[in-house]
Amino acid sequence: MNTYTYEKSQSLFKRAAKVIPCGIYGHLSPAPLVPPTDYPFYAAKASGSKFWDVDGNEFIDYMCAYGPMVLGYNNPIVEEAAEKQRKLGNCITSPSPVMVDLAEYLVNLISIADWAFFAKNGGDATSFALMIARAATGRAKAILIKGGYHGVSPWAQGPGHHGVTDEDVKNNIYVKWNDISQIEEAISDNPKQIAAFMATPYHHPAFTDSEMPGDGYWQKVEQICKKEGIVLIVDDVRCGFRLDMRGSNEYFGFKPDLICYCKAIGNGYPISALVGKDYLRNYAAKVFYTGSYWFSAVPMAAALTTLKELERINGPDIMIKLGKKLTDGMTEIAKTYGYNLKVTGVPSMPSIYITDDESLMLHQDFCAACTKRGAFFTSHHNWFISTAHTDEDIQRTWDIVEDAFKAIKKK
Ligand SMILES: Cc1ncc(COP(=O)(O)O)c(C=O)c1O
């Protein structure tokens, strides 16, 4: 099997490094792509489950733009809806009717939702959720999970990060995932001071396995929050619409007060949402929160169509089945070459690590070897499945995985 080279990506990156801090910043930075020489840095185009880099290499994309791509790149139904709205108008002095249509749709779809609010990024939704919880309770502190991710606002980055002050994070209390006693301790140490508990539906930290909620964990958290008057916030930015269309909380059987969405909601169009229970509506109205592009109608039209299509085809079910098929097959192939693949998380966004080497060197080698053969895998983050991935993609990926293991074994 031929392996790819990336001359054009590398020369673009050299130009970028002179005019853009970091060259490529944030989650698309080459820093965690090890070795960077085995990865593309710039995409030329994308369609369905695939993208092509600037060197003309084709990849089956298992990162899906880190989540937003859910129905396939350039999905014709979503693009048609976006185009129709674009012709009418996008960023206008007054909001467009599609904003009301989308809010009504979400309120009907999401089991706990009595209202919906729109912004651009996941971090807009998590920060707004926290502000609403503070406005509603008159309290300042928030319980968060160690190793959780809620965006790049100073409060969300945590202590010790560049540009973050102690003041920014002084109201955060970090507890271990799945540990009820630490939540109880935090509450008894800070009586009537905790505004919110915020967590993802299951724990999906970087560089390690994902962890499901233990039996009764969420039900107990819900009960404690109710009793203590704490606003229960689910950050569904990453899992949203890949587990359950009614909210990932339904997948685990509990009811939060606020749910944050982004990523899959618009199939790549820039939009995020916060939905909430009725009792928080007035607080959501009182907090001043807005942005230059938050009323843009094209992403709203794209989101409405994305959600309708995901619901029509039962997108989460398709992605869960495809993810299970892919990872079961990969695990079998790994075994025949004497390696152990550990798969955690929900199969529509699996975390996969080779367990035979704790240093992650072998795992990084494996992901890089697959990527330069055409299956884009990262070694530090959960992967994403879309409804556009096909059985043919999976078969091709298995062939790539087999060839990668052969090469690694030889090395
Ligand atoms: C669970 C979770 N919350 C919040 C965010 C922040 O979203 P954004 O980068 O769109 O601000 C992310 C992004 O990866 C996420 O995975």
Image (tube, rainbow, N blue to C red):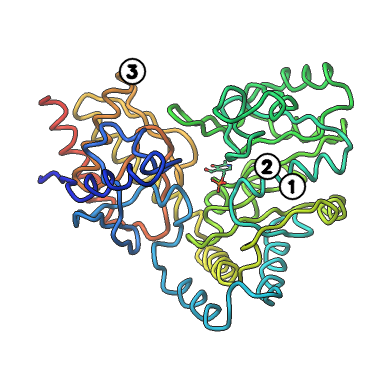
- Which is nearer the eye, 380 or 293? 293
Q: State whether label 2 is within 8 Å of ligand 1.
A: no
- Label 1 sits on a secondary structure element that is strand
Q: Splitting the image into four quadrants, where does ligand 1 fall?
A: top right
Which quarter shows the N terminus?
A: top left
Callout 2 secondary element: strand
Quadrant of residue 304 in the image? bottom right
Of mark 2 and mark 3, the one earlier in the sequence is 2
Q: What amino acid is at disc 1? A: Leu
Mark 1 vs mark 3, CA separation in Å? 38 Å
CB of mark 1 near ligand 1 (< 8 Å): no
Q: Secondary structure at mark 3?
A: loop
Q: Which residue is rendered at x = 29% and y = 41% of the image?
A: 329
Q: Which residue is mark 3?
A: 359
Left or right of 389 in this view: 146: right
Task: Identify the mark at residue 234; answer none if there is no mark.
Answer: 2
Identify the residue at image location x=32%, y=35%: 33
Q: Residue furthest front?
A: 18
Tag 1 and tag 2, C-beta contact below 8 Å: yes
- Could you say where residue 10 lies in the image, as x and y percent from the top left? 23, 44
Q: Which mark is residue 258?
A: 1
- Taking the spot 74% from the left edge, 41% from the top edge, the residue there is 130
Indicate which disc, 1 or 2, sits on the residue closer to the N terminus. Answer: 2
- Cα separation, mark 1 vs mark 2, equals 6 Å
The residue at label 3 has a CB less than 8 Å from ligand 1: no
Identify residue type, mark 3: Ser
Residue 63 position in % (x across, y down): 39, 47
Tell me how far mark 2 sits from mark 3, CA to CA: 32 Å
Q: Crowdedness of circle 3 by 10 Å Cα count: few (<14), some, many (20+)? A: few
Percent x, y of residue 155: 67, 33
Work out which quarter of the rendered image holds the C terminus and state it.
top left
